[in-house]
Image (cartoon, grey):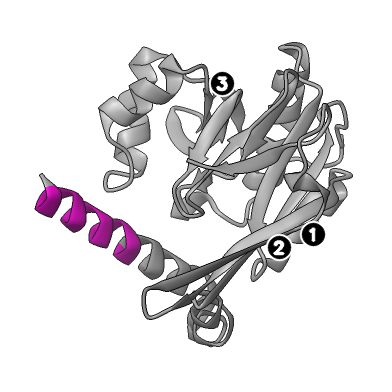
Amino acid sequence: MHLKNSYRFIIQKFDIGVDLFREYGWMKFSGQIIPWLFCRRYIFLGGPTNHSISFLQAEIPFRLELANQRDLKYLIKLRPHFYKLRQIQERIKQGHLCFLGWSGNDPIHIRWAFVGSCFIPYLHRTIRLTPGEVYTDEAYTARDFRHKGVYSYAGCLLRKFLEDMGYRRIVLALPTWSRFLMNTSANFRMEKIGEGGYWNLFGYKKYFWRGSAWKQNNDKIFVSQK
């Protein structure tokens, strides 16, 4: 089992690396993303769910739906080395929300909204959310449908969904190398509430946390070791 999990982990990282290389090219991949691996810094942002921007539209037909049991096979098909059926079912059982984006009959986008508390494996920490808050750091668009406004439009639709479900605040984490994600989040009136990450030097990890996000408070998120 340990070898199987190790193999799956390596395949995941390889797929992510290849995807980033194809998406951003060798200059950004080698000049920004690879150095970031040694100092993995994330910016945490917070903002209201009731802020919609009507002019953000996708260039292709697109709709976002809350995933149901029949949709789980599409999630796995979109990211076969990333998701396992048991993992998805466990997340949904815990109350986390999974959204699937469609263009016509093609499933092309995945986005998660985590509630209550969730363990972030890459930071080895648990984020605990207060009622009315959601946390999201996981979104994926099929490669053939990128650069068509899907990510931004899905963000608008997601906020509408969450607002209708009674959620009032959204928190997300973004890697510091992604200017596109930072700029998109600024359009949604997201404000920086903290940052965190770790130095990764040949297997040695030294974590750092800064900002108000890590204080236990009624309207803030906070982080604790699992």
Mark 1 is surrounded, within 10 Å at the Cα level, by few (under 14), some (14 to 19) or many (20 or more) other residues, namely: few
Disc 3, SS: strand
Find residue 156 and report its image quarter: top right
Secondary element under disc 1, as helix, strand or loop, is: helix
The three-letter amino acid code for the residue at tag 1 is Asn
Secondary structure beneath disc 2?
A: helix
Q: In the image, residue 195 lies at what x, y percent?
A: 72, 58
Q: Quadrant of residue 132?
A: top right
Place residue 58 in its image quadrant: top right
Q: Nearer the viewer, mark 3 or mark 1?
A: 1
How far, Cα to Cα, is label 1 from label 2? 5 Å
Q: Is residue 128 one of those drawn in magenta?
A: no
Residue lying at 59% horizontally and 45% vertically, measured from the top left: 137
Marks 1 and 2 close (CB-CB < 8 Å): yes
**Left or right: 107 in relation to 150:** left
Q: Which residues are magenta?
A: 2-14
N-term mark: 3 or 1: 3
The residue that disc 2 covers is 180
Q: Is residue 31 above or below residue 16?
A: below
Q: Which mark is residue 65?
A: 3
> Does the magenta portion include 9?
yes
